[in-house]
Amino acid sequence: MRMNVTSLFIFMLACRVFSQTTIPLHDYLRQVELNHPALRSADFEPELAEADVRSALGRFDPVLNLSYEYKDKDGKDKLNLFDGSLELPLDMLFGPKVKATYSRGLGISVNPQSSTSTPGEGAIGVSLPLFQGIFTDSRRNQLRKAMLRPDLAQAQYRIERNSVLRAAGMRYWDWSEALASVDVADSLLALARLRLDFISRRARAGESAIIDSVEIAQEFQRRQGERFRALRIAEQLAVDVAVFLWTGDGSPQQNIASKPNGLTPIADTSVLSIDAANQARLLRPELRRAEVFQQTSRMDSALTQEFLRPMVEFEASLVAYDVSALSNTDYKLGLKVSQPLLFRQASAQSQSAEITVQRADLSRSIVERMVDADAISAVIGLDRSRERLQVATEEVRLARIMVDAEKRKFEAGASTLILMNLRERFLAEALLRLVSAQADWARARLTLRWATGTI
């Protein structure tokens, strides 16, 4: 038995790598991002945001109003009324509205106020608020909020995306860890099989006690059971990994034929907490969402402040009482005042809006604290997993030395089979701890990417 545990483990791992193709984490996450239903559903958010913007812009569309009424009596016009207007609200300071009108009123029963010359009369003018609605109004406020909707939709999509990719990435490294554990079990089982054959031949030849063959057979069965346990975990995780994969037509992908990348044997990443926190504040979509909520709440508060001022609307227009003689025009001025005297509803709305602003500010502070904590925690996890990986690597090195030494003693007849089995068990436990440390390191790097918004 010249093949030791280390060389057997490396040989079996190489056979697994060459026999099956691997899917890197980046490619796997790309497939998840392309077809996962949760992300495809989130893809509709930008379209909904665009619809909201169009809806808000629609409140500034020109409005055309036309009406016509005609009555005849004894072949003469009793009533012949036509009214038309075109109104265009403008998105600018004071929120002015430009309006053009045309009216014609003929007939023997026309109201004197509606009566016009035969060509009709026209007017063009503007109306604008003097107190309430100077800086903003409901129309402009809705448009400003709608303009933020694409940013909110993008932030919401990235939150959903990051959450799904983080969950998928964690399952990916769980799967890789499980397969590495199977490799450890396979190597130990193969070594036990070789020793079982060797001792069984010696027992049949009378060179070894029968009880030794029973003992190694027992050890072989124990390792075979551990191998089945590890294989079952790996197979279940393969199913879990495939759950995140969907085809382009929206149907679930039943299985995954490739294998994950192997675990990284060394820790090669170091990040400062302050750098991670700064990057997280720049890139985490939760902060952008909180910022949009702050902006919209402040817009609503500014709108309610407008309602605390009187509603006074000024109108001015040029009037041509005979549209066939446009050079002869007059002017028309008007002033409208409409406002509850006690302002109770307006003051209540203002108070509610101000509370909403304060809540949005507090929510932003909470989100900032959580983002900082996520980044710092991820860096701590990365540092501790690096230290654990270094310790586990050294433990495996020492365990291999002990196995090789025990093997030489066993072959020289200075050791027992049970000690040899125990040394190999200790090595197997050290290898599994190394696999766990490598997986923790991989998961810590993934967590750091999520915490800093770079996943």
Image (cartoon, rainbow, N blue to C red):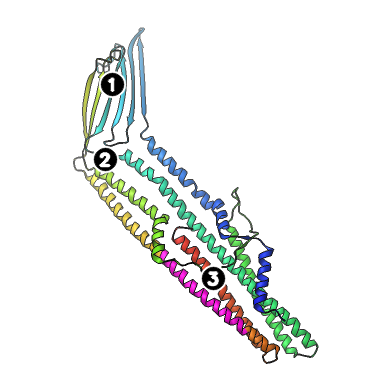
Assign the magenta stretch its main secondary structure. Answer: helix
The residue where tag 2 is placed is 135
Q: Which amino acid does label 1 sit on?
A: Ala
Q: Distance between the residues labelled 3 and 1?
A: 82 Å
Q: Residues within 10 Å of mark 3 (few under 14, many from 20)?
A: few
Q: How far apart are marks 3 and 2 (CA)?
A: 61 Å
The residue where tag 1 is placed is 123
Closest to the camera, between mark 3 and mark 2, is: 3
Classify mark 2: helix, strand or loop: loop
Residue 339 x %, y %: 21, 38
Tell me the quarter of the image containing the N terminus. Answer: bottom right
The residue where tag 3 is placed is 266
Report if residue 378 lies within the magenta region.
Answer: yes
Q: In which quarter of the image is residue 26?
A: bottom right
Q: How far apart are marks 2 and 1 (CA)?
A: 27 Å
Tell which circle, 3 or 2, labels the residue nearer the N-terminal end: 2
Q: What residue type is labelled 3?
A: Ile
Q: Is residue 427 left or right of residue 440?
A: right
Q: Which residue is drawn at 56% across and 66% down?
A: 174
Closest to the camera, between mark 2 and mark 1, is: 2
